[in-house]
Amino acid sequence: KGGIMAYKITEDCTACGLCATECPVQAINEGDPIYVIDFNKCVECAGYFDEAQCAAVCSVGACVPDPEHPRK
């Protein structure tokens, strides 16, 4: 269940901040110019929700699985 990898935010981010408010582990922070996900904190919402909340609320589809950072 789940993609077993951290999520990342692409350059499509509009910096609305909605993803950061939805993250149950506070892994998302405001960057410059877009929001960023700390891959060391991201748990794909496992144990909290059935799907990654950042991806669920992102209106531009900027929150995507990050194959460069698989969860251990």
Image (tube, rainbow, N blue to C red):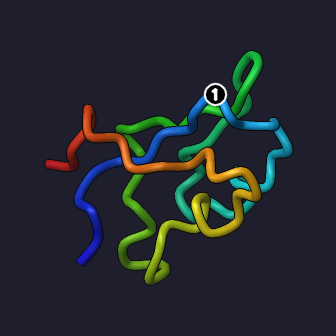
The image shows residue 14, relative to residue 31, as above or below, that is: below
Q: Amino acid at mark 1?
A: Glu
The image shows residue 44, relative to residue 67, as above or below, that is: below
> Looking at the picture, how far across and down is residue 20, in whole percent?
70, 50
Judging depth in this view, the residue of 53 and 59 nearest the camera is: 59
Q: Quadrant of residue 16?
A: top right
Query: Which residue corresponds to the image point at 61% horizontal and 59% vertical from the top-left?
Result: 54
Q: Residues within 10 Å of mark 1 (few under 14, many from 20)?
A: few
> Looking at the picture, how far across and down is residue 48, in whole percent?
47, 78
Residue at mark 1? 11
Residue 64 shown left or right of residue 23 in the figure? left
> Looking at the picture, how far across and down is residue 15, in whole percent?
81, 36
Judging depth in this view, the residue of 59 and 4 nearest the camera is: 59
The image shows residue 70, relative to residue 31, as above or below, that is: below
Q: Which quarter shows the N terminus?
A: bottom left
Query: Which residue corresponds to the image point at 40% horizontal and 61% vertical from the top-left?
Result: 44
Given the current orientation, which residue lies at the most extreme left position? 72
Judging depth in this view, the residue of 69 and 12 nearest the camera is: 12
Q: Secondary structure at mark 1?
A: loop
Query: Which residue corresponds to the image point at 63% horizontal and 53% vertical from the top-left?
Result: 61
